[in-house]
Image: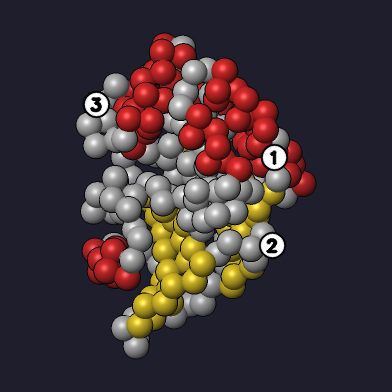
């Protein structure tokens, strides 16, 4: 069974289209989305329409909640909130309802792995350091968990015998990791629509459950066109500029 793991698409149609074109030959069985279909970029409706046709297993992200009207975004910076309120007005009623009905993570997929947007104990919490990761491993017993939210591809590995926690950034496209039976994993595939690891290429992962292997992909897309559309929509110029520098 092969699972395509996508996170933080953030209304970036150009990036999503490039990802889906790249994956046509991968024989994907199921599409998994770790939250944040929308926010920041200029095509929220189109992104949701495309992904709905893939019948994904998806959970909500913090931007999905604001755009759906489930959260007021009081903790967002003004650029993010402005983009989400603009996005809310762009969606069809059907797509707004789709976001509204997305489940809260974590949820388990086929008895194989858990998915969450932020952390299992708080869907909006950023897993950024050893204390965050260790808390997840202590409070969630899944062997493999995928998470998003930080937009930074990385793998946390926990060896329960030695009580040892390791972190490895996961930024080079084509990287493959074989998962070991005696370890547990917390894996971020990075962001499709707004990478923040100083690499502007779209980031996503493939999980081959038969081989217990994770493959990270980084691919180019038409950043300039995505930038033009953000500016044409009247959103903050920084939201366009950051795409080119991966931050």
Tell me residue 213's x, y (percent): 60, 66
Q: For this view, does 181 lie left or right of residue 15? A: left
Q: Secondary structure at mark 2?
A: loop
Q: Earlier in the sequence, mark 3 or mark 2?
A: 3
Q: Label 3: few (<14), some or many (≥20) within 10 Å?
A: some
- Going 48% across and 34% down the picture, which residue do you hit? 238
Question: In percent of the image, x 32 and y 70: which residue is there?
Answer: 130
* Kind of element beneath mark 1: loop
Q: Upstream in the sequence, badge 3 or badge 1?
A: 3
Q: Nearer the viewer, residue 128 or 237?
A: 237
Dot 3: element: loop
The answer to whether residue 3 of the structure is visible from this angle is no
97 or 14: which is nearer to us? 14
Closest to the camera, between mark 1 and mark 2, is 1
In this picture, is 210 found above or below 228?
A: below
Q: Along the horizontal axis of the image, is 160 left or right of 13?
A: left
Q: Residues within 10 Å of mark 1 (few under 14, many from 20)?
A: some
Residue 174 is tagged as 2
Whether the residues at callouts 3 and 1 have beta carbons within 8 Å, the answer is: no
Q: How many marks?
A: 3
Residue 151, x across and y down, in percent: 47, 50
Is 152 rendered above or below residue 159?
above
Residue, x 59% and y 72% (percent of image)? 178
| Residue placed under numbered mark 3 in the picture | 72
First of labels 1, 2 by sequence position: 2
Q: Quadrant of residue 13?
A: top right
Q: CA distance from mark 3 to mark 2?
A: 39 Å
Rendered image: mark on residue 221: 1
C-alpha span from label 1 to label 2? 17 Å
Instruction: Left or right? Give the position of 169 relative to 96.
Output: right
């Amino acid at each position: 069974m092969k699972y395509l793991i996508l996170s933080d698409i953030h209304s970036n149609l150009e990036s999503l289209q490039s990802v889906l074109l790249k994956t046509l030959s991968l024989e994907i069985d199921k599409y998994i989305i770790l939250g944040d279909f929308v926010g920041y970029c200029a095509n929220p409706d189109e992104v949701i329409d495309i992904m709905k046709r893939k019948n994904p297993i998806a959970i909500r992200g913090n931007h999905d909640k604001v755009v759906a009207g489930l959260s007021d975004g009081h903790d967002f910076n003004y650029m993010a909130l402005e983009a989400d309120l603009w996005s809310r007005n762009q969606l069809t009623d059907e797509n707004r309802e789709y976001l509204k009905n997305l489940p809260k993570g974590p949820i388990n997929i086929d008895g194989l792995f858990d998915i969450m947007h932020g952390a299992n104990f708080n869907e909006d919490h950023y897993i950024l350091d050893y204390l965050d990761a260790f808390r997840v491993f202590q409070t969630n017993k899944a062997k493999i968990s995928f998470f998003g939210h930080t937009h930074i591809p990385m793998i946390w590995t926990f060896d329960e015998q030695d009580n040892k926690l390791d972190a490895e950034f996961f930024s080079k496209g084509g990287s493959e990791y074989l998962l070991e039976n005696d370890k547990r994993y917390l894996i971020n595939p990075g962001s499709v629509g707004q990478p923040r690891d100083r690499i502007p290429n779209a980031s996503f992962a493939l999980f081959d459950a038969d081989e217990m292997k994770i493959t990270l992909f980084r691919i180019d897309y038409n950043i300039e066109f995505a930038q033009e559309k953000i500016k044409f929509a009247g959103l903050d110029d920084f939201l366009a500029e950051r795409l080119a520098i991966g931050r």
